[in-house]
Amino acid sequence: MRVMNIRFWLLVVVAALLTSGAAFGSGFSLFEQGAKATAMGGAFAATADDPSAIFYNVAGIAQIRRTEFNVGGTAINFSNQFTGDANDTFASGSTGFYRRHTFVPPNAYVVVPIGSNLTFGIGAFTPYGLRTSWQDPWVGRFSSRDANIKVLSVEPALAWQTSDGRLAIGGGPEYRRAHVILNRNIPSPSVNPFVGRLPDIANAYLASGWESHWGWNVGILYKPSNAFRIGASYRTDMTIDFKGNVTINQIPTGSAQLDALIKAQLPPSQGVTTSIPFPATLIVGVGTGVIPNWNIEADVTRTTWSRFKSLDVVFTQTPAANISRPQNWKDTYSYRLGANHPVTPRWDVRLGTVYDQNPQPTEAVSPLLPDADRFGIAFGVGYHQGSWVIDATEFALRFNPRSTKGVSTDLNGQYKTSANLISVNLGYRF
Amino acid sequence: MTHIRTITRIAAVLLLTALIAIPTFAARGKADFSRLVTLGDSFGVGVSNVGANITHQRFSWPAVLARQVGLNTDCATDGPRCFEQAYISEPGILPELQLVSLSPLTIQLKPGLGAPLNSGLQRPYNNLSVDGAEIADALQVDGDGNEQFSAPIVLRGLGSMTDQALRLNPTFIAMWIGGDDAFNGVQGGKPALMTSVADFTRDYNAVLDKLVKGAPDAGFVVGNLPTDIRGIPFVSVIPSVLIDPGTGKPVRDPSGNFIPLIADLGGGNFGQLPPGSLVLLTSLQLIQSGFGIPAALKPLLPPLPNIGKPLPDEAVLTPTEIAAINQRLVDYNSAINAAASSRDIPVVDINAFLNQVKAGIHAGPFNLNPAYITGGIFSLDGYHLTDVGYAMFANQYIKTINAAYGTRIPVAGLWQFLQNNDPNAQASSELPIFDDAAAKAMNMLTPPPLRRRMSH
């Protein structure tokens, strides 16, 4: 049984490494902004004792009393197998897969103590991101061939703690930049009468510029006793408005007459606008050291995904081509449990687990983002040598199979997703 | 005594539980498709664009059904799970019509003639559908060389459709036949050409009897018939009023009324076509030479040789004739339902399917409807189906089998008809654009008159 389990996980890891695809957390959030926190399943708001606290709970940097650098990244490999619904007139019998792709959201932090109670920090991280790129020929290409949302945040932060170290508070403004690419094909309204087949008539490639918005983030960390810690942090929602261009490239059908008719109907390449609502995130965590030499923490995260009502693309020249895809997402919880255990003065081992709710109603499940509830297990090690710190984490995520239950107007079927994440961070303490 | 009562109670509960737990289907035989046999007409052959050729035969409803139940329709050599059809090489028999130009509308027969590809098969074909077959033909026609169309190719003088079906020792029989019993009346413009209800009922029961007795353990499914001929392109494309070829809109007389075409309304009774009349697609050439256009318009029109001459009876259907044909189809369906239900044979509701088609069907990102040329369901002859249409037709069989036999056969997904998944489909870019008159091509839309059975 034990051998089986190891083999199973090995398979999951190997499969995830070999067949990579896209990246996203619940919805399109990314909670992996530091290898240590990731190893604890992201349950880090009440620990927050390394520079990644700027992301997890900014109050935590007040605990850091030496200047410290920390840089890292998470290599994320997603795989997805789509299987068409056996009762669906269009999709039955079809399959689809993500293109091989490794997504590496980076993170970097600097923390500088000022005096004995105050700490200044600055962090750059990727709190959101999405990549769903499907291998051609993909039956869902009329919904989405490739979607890519890149996000980078920079946050300067300040935290203060009481002299006894029992209470810390912190906060800072967040400057977020993002960029969107949406790529899909346009279907013919009906058959190509010359060949009796269903043709693609154009490709629509939408690329936005890098757009930005400001938000803010606050946190609190309270240690009522040496055995207990409570942490909470809040990151604001924001909506980023994008301007960009859509490039419409006609795909020949093989008939010059039909192509001429299609050309007259297709919107021209033009400017477009869209916007993406990012949710607010509230994290509450409780940590304990009651078991000697073990730090155990449990967190709950609330994410206000219900802000994502609709994905709308407005065409500046031809409003008739405007797209509105209802999303009607729901607010979600995630539950995280993690442990850190120093085994030698130099080595720490870490374990974590997470259950992450997905925000998507069945109607919104599509090739653009086929989300599902997921369960993850993480294992990590930390190594300290002099001023150097290295953290490395392996995090395997299993998604529940997600079916559109026949209600999708785009593409009906089941998505089976799995993911493997490897996080590495390197730190230096002065 | 109490023991007996208790045991009786337990037995009753167990029996009840068993009855609830085991789904019972009112369907004969079981869903074993290893020796699937199909009987049908031109739809079963996979005729598309008036012709039968391997490209479209691969999507005949029997072939689609066979593939969905896991059979191989493309066996190089015959084997256990081979579903054999009498394939015909390109461009088919008849050669297939092709759309060569949308403007001017030009539809032509492909040049050449196809030939049978696997006539040496050492056993009956699994698909015993014969082009033009009426219900009585399933018992009588044996393809001995004296019959037209695909009978000699499919049946090869080895016995009738039903004889050969039984020789295959079928595990499952699927049948759709009877459409041509009524369609002869549509195609010939005369309800009198249809099979009588009495004959249809007798023959339908005889066919089912013979198959059920010969293969008592086989699963069995049949399909009913569409009961409204209106809406299929074959009768809906050409209006019964005068059209201005320049604008494509109806011409109005000085008082603003449409101008009905004139025709033989039956029995030498000439006059204006009453509202609701249908003009067959095959009459286009006649109208373009002046037939049906009232003589009073002669001074206003270019000199057409036949202005003032009525359209012949066989070119049109009056509302009375349409009602008679539709009623006959309703009566056929009653006969099919009675014959099938008395033998526990599920009936596929093809009538409901055609009504869905008329309303338009949304399949993934595509919309399919009954429109001529562009709708995607009906082929260029106006009544046979396209590959897409046949796949959807086969899906009706699959859904009925799943419901009746508790199977989970996947439906055929239309994604397989995506043009850009099939590099061969791109070959159409080589098509030349011909300028021949559309009328010439339209005349080729219908096969020669069907063989009339001696028995009637």
Image (cartoon, rainbow, N blue to C red):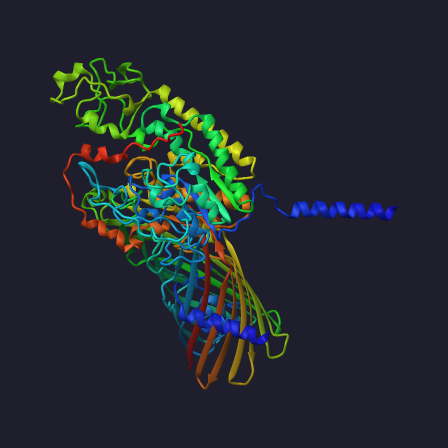
* Relative horizontal placement of residue A232, taking residue B189 as reference (left or right): right
- Please state the horizontal and vertical placement of residue A298, each as a whole percent of the image: 57, 66
Q: Locate the N terminus of chain A by quadrant.
A: bottom right
Q: Residue most toward the right?
A: B1
- Please state the horizontal and vertical placement of residue A366, each as a whole percent of the image: 41, 52
At 50% from the left and 45% from the top, the residue drawn is B401
Identify which residue, B108 or A156, lies in the foreground.
B108
Q: Quadrant of residue B389?
A: top left
* Relative horizontal placement of residue B92, taking residue A377 as reference (left or right): left
Position of residue B439 relative to residue B9, above or below, is: above
- Please state the horizontal and vertical placement of residue A190, each as a whole percent of the image: 31, 42
Q: Locate the C terminus of chain A by quadrant.
A: bottom left
- Please state the horizontal and vertical placement of residue A228, each as a whole percent of the image: 61, 70
At 41% from the left and 27% from the top, the residue drawn is B195
Identify which residue, A263 or B429, lies in the foreground.
B429
Q: Quadrant of residue A127?
A: bottom left
Does residue A369 appear anywhere in the picture? Answer: yes
